[in-house]
Structure formats: C-alpha cells, structure tokens
Image: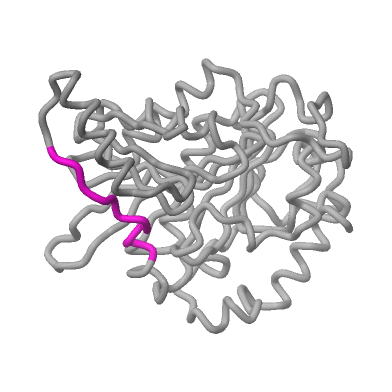
Amino acid sequence: MPLVYATELGTLVRLEDDPPWDQVVEELVHQLDADHHRGTISAGDASFGLVTTLLDAPPVPVLTVAWTMDPPVTRGPFYDSGQPRYRWGVPDDVTRTVLDQAVSWVQPDAGEAFVTQGAYPVAVSASDAAEVFEESLQRFPSTATTLAAVHPIMPTAGLHLRALTLSAFGVGTWGRTAVTGHAAAALDLASIARGMASQLDVAFVRPMFPAQLGGSSYLPPQWRMGRAEWSEKVPDANGIQLLTGAHLERASNLDDWIVTRVATDRFLVQARDLDRWYYPLPSDDWAAGDYPDAEMVRKARSDFGAMILGA
C-alpha cells in the first residue's frame, strides 16, 4: 500500500515497491479525476538536498535527550533475540508537547521546512508539521524522523539549518548550524533540556557533524543497546549533561563541576570552563577523536567514575 502524507503544501505519495510507474501514475490520475480533484503530479526529490551542503560543515554542539518511556523499555515487547522491539514509547501528552515545541523551535519563521524519514522528505508548513512528524514517527520508529528548516543568514547569503530528530526509545537530537559561539550555543541547547528536565532520563551536549544530525554513530554501540540503563549511566563525560540522582550516586567526585538542581531528582552538571569543551574544531581533529584535550577528558571521566557505561 502506498504511504500518503497530506499537507497544506501538497500531498506526497510514497510507493515502497518497484511497480510499473506509468501504470501507477495513470491509475492515480484516473482516481483523482473521478474524485473531482485537480492539480499536477510530479516525481518527488528522493534525497534531502541539505545533507550534501552540510557534508563539509565542521562539528557543532548538539543536544541529545532521552525522554522517560511509559511503559519502560524493560517491559517489552521484545524480538525473538531478546532485544526490545523498536517503538517511540513516550506518553501521548508528552509527545504532543515535544512536537509543538519542536515546530516553534525549528520553524520560528516562514523558512522552508521538511519532515524527512530516511531519504523521503515531506514539505510542511508550521500548521501541519507536528501532525506529519508524529505520523512518520509512529509508523516507522526504527528509522529516525527529522523536522528540519532552512533559514537565510543575514547579512550573508548562506543558509542556517535547525533540526530536531526523534527516534526509537524516546531519543531526540536537537541541532543547528552557523552558531556564533560554540559555548553559548551549548548553553542555549542546555536550556531546552532544563525546560523538560522532569520528563527526561538523561541529556547531554556534545559535538557532532551537522550532516550526522539524527544519527547515533557518534555514540558507543553498547550505549545504544542499553536503553534501560540511561537513567543512571552516561555514554561518556561531556561539558554539559542533565542527570538523575541515580547518576550522581555513581559519580566519583563532582567537586570541580557546577551541579544545579533543576527539577525533582534532576540535576544539570556543567563544566566550569565551557570554552574548553565547546569551541570551533577542525573536522579532522574531531573525526580522529581528538576533541577536546586528552587531559581534560581523562580528569572528567575520573570524576564521573561508575556513571559512565562500561567504566
């Protein structure tokens, strides 16, 4: 069956198989004509063109959050292998709030916006973005769904991307390009986590290439597989993270960190010198794992202790 996304900007019909295209289009034309519809049919763009423009963009701070699931991932359902089945898993009322916040953050103006799942973008407006986003998320939880918008940068002629990606097990990634200051951008992203702190198991701000927004390849594989442990462990030490009391109980020594209670059993743990954690970094250095300086990371990992997964 074709997948249909109807928006104010048009309707996208996604055909998953490889049928005889001429026949399919002819049948679609006859059906639309019989239903007294008028318009045009054209092939959609099978790739999210912005990705190609971002391939050379240097890493920027990105916020990764994990909303509390209900029921928790430990209650299944499970595949035959014993791994949890892919599902979004966040309560409906929280999901609606998340989507509304996403639209206002990603589309604060009339910039061109897309909901994209895999390589299939759907053009959306501010009024229908949340609905299309949720439909794609619920239908295909195993594949990340992204809401992205392009904004012109003044006075330059460049483009600025804002994007939020949601994926299975209540995971979200907030990112933007063209930041004016990396430490300031990290704090701005941290404010998003603070605003929803009581609904999160964990959150952290770390660098990522903009072209990888929504991906998880920058996180350890054992972290991605261990969703049940996220409310008490982190993948690594970062300059900013939002943690639970269970996280803090595993720490070795956080005397050198700024620890602020921001909600019941939720704490923002922040490095005292964010400029050392978040600064413009050559892409080759980040790709080689050289960010940030080794001694600072060693000390941070020692401070976090058993809070780090696998420590």
Image position of 21 (left or right of 298): left
- Residue at figure coordinates x 39%, y 30% from the top left: 101
Image spot of residue 233 (x, y percent): 79, 45
- Please determine whether, in this image, residue 66 is positioned above or below residue 51: above
Decide whether residue 45 is among the magenta residues. yes
Which is more toward the observer, 13 or 49?
13
Residue 201 horizontal/vertical position (percent): 69, 34
Residue toward you, 224 or 14: 14
Against 283, residue 94 (above or below) is: above
Asked whether residue 161 is in view, the answer is yes
Residue 303 lies left or right of residue 311; in this view the side is left
Task: List x then y, in percent, for residue 276.
Answer: 56, 70
In this picture, is 49 found above or below 243?
Answer: below
Quarter holding residue 185: bottom left
Tell me which residue sits at (66%, 43%) in the image.
259
Residue at left offset 86%, top offset 52%: 252
